[in-house]
Amino acid sequence: MEPNSTEVKKYLLSLQEHICQTLSRLDGQASFAADSWERPEGGGGISRVIAEGRIFEKGGVNFSHVMGNQMPPSATAHRPELSGAPWEAMGVSLVMHPCNPYVPTSHANVRFFIARPEDKPPVYWFGGGYDLTPFYGFRDDCVHWHRTARAACAPFGDDVYPRYKQWCDEYFHIRHRQEPRGIGGLFYDDLNSGDFDRDFAFMQAVGDSYLKAYTPIVQRRQTMDYGEHERNFQLYRRGRYVEFNLVYDRGTLFGLQSGGRTESILMSMPPLARWDYNRQPRPGTPEHELTAYFLTDRDWLAEEDTNA
């Protein structure tokens, strides 16, 4: 039986709506503006963007459902047998850039691909995850983030969280900087166990746990006082985010190679960022602690019982 892409699409649209409603209420000032678009090669999507809010300087929650007659190179690098096959891809992808430097940037996505090679059964796979990029680190935030990720994975096996946590650490690594982008979370791709219902259930577990992971952190940090020094450092660290997304991110590359909508693909970019030449935070400062302690691919759940 062919995988039920109709149910996947229904879930993704409901997830986008739920996340936008929840984050709009949390912000209390700005709301998400919706922009529907069509792709000439097939498909389209709904981009929903929030800007200049009380909490969120910019954020986007995108739904896309696109298709084509030939898989793009980024999707066939590990599957040369699918080159030339008709394909269909759908997903929800989001990035939230808060105003307050003490509130971390967050990213999440869940996606589904299906290829239909000629004279062969359809081939599907799921992917996604979420990760957190703080500018100022707090151990209790990191532990909560990873505890929530572990709980989402728990029904699917004890080995799932450690495996996808490690994959996240390895994937969100800025190789030319020799540093992680953030404190990680979950990352998985190529998920096809042969049991479509179980794989789809895992995608839903990941998608549904994002708000549980992120909103308590936002609520804790949104009212912390900050000044020009902290804001300056936030913009500097945002530059690292831009570098990763434009150089390494699979979703960005897939979108551009498949003729996706550029505005939606690049909505993950922050509204402001900066690059300083050879900037080195002074040892002992919170800015130095970010890279010396927090951005080190740590096992945060080994620290659950420590005091933050």
Image (tube, rainbow, N blue to C red):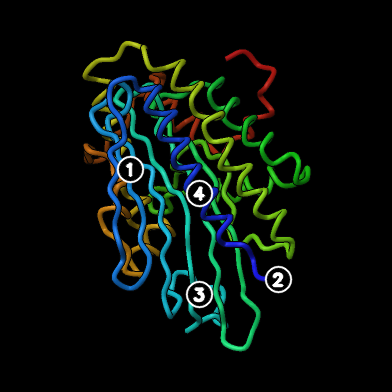
- Whichever of labels 4 and 3 marks the residue nearer the N terminus, that label is 4
What is the crowding at mark 1: few (fewer than 14 residues within 10 Å), some, or many (at least 20)? many
Residue plotted at (59% across, 51% down)? 167
Measured as percent of width and height from the top left, residue 285 is found at: 38, 19
The CA distance from mark 3 to mark 2 is 24 Å
Vertical relation: 149 (above or below) 245: above
- Whichever of labels 4 and 1 marks the residue nearer the N terminus, that label is 4
Going by the picture, which residue comes out furthest to the right? 158
The CA distance from mark 4 to mark 1 is 13 Å
Q: Amino acid at mark 4?
A: Leu
Label 2 element class: loop
Quarter of the image with the C terminus in it: top right
What is the crowding at mark 3: few (fewer than 14 residues within 10 Å), some, or many (at least 20)? some
- State the residue position of label 2: 1
- State the residue position of label 3: 76
- State the residue position of label 1: 48
- State the residue position of label 4: 12
Q: Amino acid at mark 1?
A: Arg
Measured as percent of width and height from the top left, residue 270 is found at: 28, 40
Closer to the observer: label 1 or label 3?
A: 1
- Whichever of labels 2 and 1 marks the residue nearer the N terminus, that label is 2
